[in-house]
Amino acid sequence: MGTNHLGTNPILKPNCHRDILTRLADLAPPVILLRILNMNSIGRTSLTLTALSLALVGCSGGEKLDPPQNILFVGNSYTFARIAPALQYNAANVKDMTAAYNTVDPTGGNSFPIGTGLPPSPCTTPDTGCFEPHPWGGVPGIFKALADQSGLNYTVSLSTRNAATLRGQFLNTANANWDLRANMAREKWDVVVLQGQSDEPLLPAKAKNGNPVSFKTYANLIEQYIHVGTGVTTTEADIFGGLANCTAAVTAAVPGPGLSSANCTTSRVIPANTNANPNAKVYLMQTWARPDMVEAHKCTIADKNSLNGAPIVDPTCSAGTNGSATTGQNNLYYTSKATTAENLKDMSTDMSTVFYGLAETNKKFAGVLPVGNAFQRAVDVKAVKSSNFYKADGTYDESGSQMNLWWFDRTHASVYGSYLSALVSFGTISGRNPTAFGANEKAAKDLGISQNDAVLLQNIAAETLVASGVALR
């Protein structure tokens, strides 16, 4: 697996500077410590300076301390993690910017299913606010725990709702009470991570929600909004260069976003972003390949009698479900290869091409968080479950001893997948090598991930980052 690119430098500790006096006690006599504590003399002995310097080096691993960073994660359930324990992890130490919206109007979050994933019982009445209870921690919560252990002064926020597209984030199409665009302008951000709908970047022939024109257009608009923040009153017809372009089907010779005339001509008021930051680093989070789009299984629905809405077979494959009412089978999109692992790789490759292509075309993006590539690397090296995701009856199959990066619905991340996502995000944004955390990393322990699995995922994250050209230190 990967090597530790930090060499002998220690991971920074969250309370490292509180330990300075303890460190000094081993380096200097009591009289020197008293001089430091009293701070009543401009002069300092060389021994005092040496001791203090050594203590600080011990804190920082010999490196200059990183500046404070105000970080926003924009996304959906792939970011807020959807399932306990990752859903609620470290929520007290991150800012869930949609928690207040959910209090006002729970329906706006498209919260689903009715359970919390935690005992003692699920909710019994739909849309009551106890769906996926706020505040959320998710991947940002894990990311924040990693940053704290590294001594990094990161303030972390998330603006997320279920199934949100980047179009929905920018235009607030879901619900008037959920002003997701306002969250992007609420503070001056140093780093913004954009995560769109999972299969939207793909071609429509290869995904139920494939709409690369819309994905790229709104990713670029959000980048401009974060960096420049110009206010405007416009329509989507204007955004896409005319009504014909706006209504053009996703499958047209010149593909469009496939919007209705009503959507295209609706006036959209975009207030100015008074907190725009031209120096903000805006990243694209590359989503992962999905076994539910690759491996044959029957249509499923969420079991609303369960705590977490785990999928069960839908015998009617009812309207709106991604499948055929005739065969009862879920629609698949990547099937040309001989194995599930190869088909996952086919999908991962397409995802990678879209994300890195967009970052290459628009140089104002800081880069890509290669989370999807990390999932695929784990499959390629046979570190995780890579086949037999379903039983013959179409329900999920959890047999086998290998860890599984995907939750029961085979689209959302499991706790292992969310941990890997956070590791890749942390490594990309901070430049720190994830392998430096080691077996005793706190978030993994809190989430119930074994030491061996934590180290394995840290190595996969590091290897992916190096392969993607991220310079780790």
Image (tube, rainbow, N blue to C red):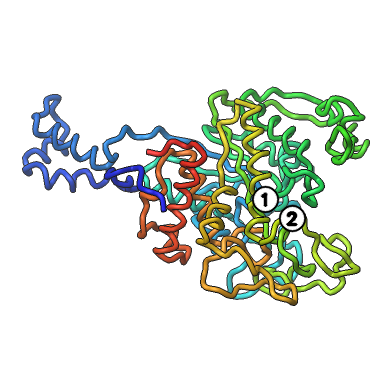
Q: Position of residue 436 (x, y in %)?
A: 36, 49
Q: Position of residue 253 (x, y in %)?
A: 88, 34
Q: What number is the disc on residue 301? A: none
- Left or right of residue 375: residue 357: right
Q: Nearer the viewer, mark 2 or mark 1?
A: 2
Q: Position of residue 415 (x, y in %)?
A: 54, 61
Disc 2 or 1, which lies upstream in sequence? 2
Q: How far separated are the C-alphas under marks 2 and 1?
A: 9 Å
Q: Position of residue 416 (x, y in %)?
A: 52, 60
Name which quarter of the figure residue 183 lies in: top right
Residue 444 visible? The answer is yes
Q: Which residue is mark 1?
A: 346
Residue 149 visible? The answer is no
Q: Nearer the viewer, residue 383 or 145?
A: 383
Q: Nearer the viewer, residue 439 or 65?
A: 439
Residue sitting at 83 percent across and 62 percent down? 323
Label 2 element class: loop
- Left or right of residue 41: residue 467: right
- Quadrant in which the C terminus is drawn: top left
Name the residue type under label 2: Ser
Q: Nearer the viewer, residue 458 or 149?
A: 458
Residue sitting at 55 percent across and 33 percent down? 189
Q: Which residue is mark 2?
A: 336
Residue sitting at 51 percent across and 56 percent down? 419
Name the residue type under label 1: Asp
- Left or right of residue 22: residue 60: right
Label 1 element class: helix
Q: In the displayed orientation, state which residue is furthest to the front.
A: 338
Check whether the beta carbons of the residues at disc 2 and disc 1 lie within 8 A of each other.
yes
